[in-house]
Image (cartoon, helix red, strand yellow):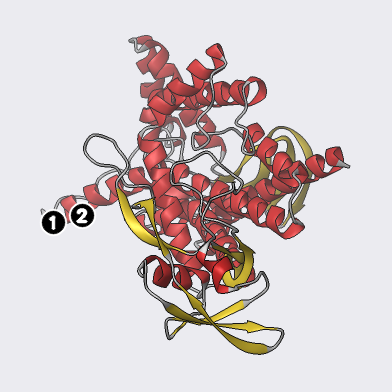
Amino acid sequence: MEILLYVGGLLFMLVGLGVSIALHEMGHLVPAKLFGVHVGQYMIGFGPRLWSQRIGETEYGFKWLPLGGFISMSGMYPPSPQALGAAAEQAAEAGPQRGGGLFRTLVQDARTANDETIDPDRAERVFYRLPVWKRVVVMAGGPVMNLVLATLIFTVLASGIGVQQGTTTIASVSECVLPAGSAQTECAQGDPVAPAAQAGILPGDRLLSIGGTPVDTFAEASEIIQASPGRVLPVVVERDGQEVTLSLTPVVAERQAVDEHGRGAVDDAGEPVMHEVGYAGVGGQLAYVPQPIGTGLEITGENVGAVAGILVTLPQRLWDVGVSLVTGGERDPNGPLSVVGVGRLAGEVAATDAPILNRFVVLLSLLGSLNIALFVFNLIPLLPLDGGHIVVALWDGVKRAWAKLFRRPPPKPVDATRLVPLTIVVAGLLIVMGAVLLLADLFNPVKLLG
């Protein structure tokens, strides 16, 4: 059964990844067609064709390796000189003979491949002829679709299912007050009775008010208790449908302070900052509490910031992954992962011994985070990523605006094929990065559940 659950989690993530890729490419396809660009192919995956069907002028299909996707738009770049006339063709043919080597060959190959996408009968329906803002919309459409999907997922999680938090229903009551900093887990003779037990609070009671203040969440109740060490607090609970009034006196306890991010605060020497708070010895039942509709958007923003932070330190993180792969050291659970790594985590989550809803929530969270990663990563301003194409379009717009400002003739469209050598270097680095992460996820994976 555990194996079936593991496979189920893996399949869930693979299907989710496929949908994410499909929507990403749809984000490019729809505006391209709306703007009149001829789109020859819409493919999910790479490698040999698995299945395809031509609908209208576009071939839709799947390929064997589900590691991405693409659409083939006519005329991503301006045509090469060969495509513009015989005289230009002769001049271009004379060029390679004067030298240039590998660089010139790569550029020329890219131009030839680009020329093949331009149908003479659809010469006006090419991408490079679009206004700058339309090119930006087409290229940004893919990442934006991933952002929209992530926002939808996090909204469903936060407002549809809810965020797991303590409720005012009491789940547990401690029998005694354990010494601060002690490793002791059970009460010993002579340990003082916990205030909640002494007050007569029982598991199953629902807190209505503390110290005369109504409470709706366990966090509100905890805040009042922690602010009232040594004070006598009237506590009203609902027990078996009846309201019962009790008297609670929290004892003084030392706890580590927390910073604005909810982490344990430390001083300049790195020591924990301790302060005195009230302690009662009660725990609230956990439940999924729906949040306001805008919470999903807030969570999306936080995730975008976190992934952008990872991206800034990506070289160092990749180095650490490589070191852990060689040494067998523990991986950073917040570090980068390959598709295999994400799939393994999904399998572990699905197979763990936890309520089904809890597992589903974690799986959806992983899928949402994956879409955030696709959004941020694809906006890196380097070809062949979407961000690189956006930069090329914006540069073309700057050149045209400059020429218009000084009343000069419109400049030629930016020829991005000249950047092919750099594009190949970037693609090579992406392949190396993918290989390192893949090997690490196979032989030294991150274990989310320990």
The answer to whether 60 is drawn above or below residue 33 in the figure is above
At x 17%, y 51%, the residue is: 403
Numbered label attached to residue 405: 1
Task: Indicate the quadrant where residue 319 lies.
Answer: top left
**Kind of residue sitting beneath label 1:** Leu
> Between residues 405 and 50, which one lies in front from this camera angle?
50
Residue bearing mark 2: 401
Place of residue 331 in the rendered image (x, y in percent of width and height, measured from the top left): 53, 27
Residue 276 spot, x, y in % from top left: 33, 56
Which element type, helix, strand or loop, lies under badge 1? helix
Question: Mark 2 and 1 residues: CB-CB less than 8 Å, in contact?
Answer: yes
Which residue is depicted at the point 38% across and 52% down? 255
Does 84 sit left or right of 246 as displayed?
A: left
Q: Residues under labels 2 and 1: Cα distance?
A: 6 Å
Mark 1 burial class by Cα count in 10 Å: few <14, some 14-19, many 20+: few
| Pointer 2 local density, CA inside 10 Å: few below 14, some 14–19, many at least 20 | some
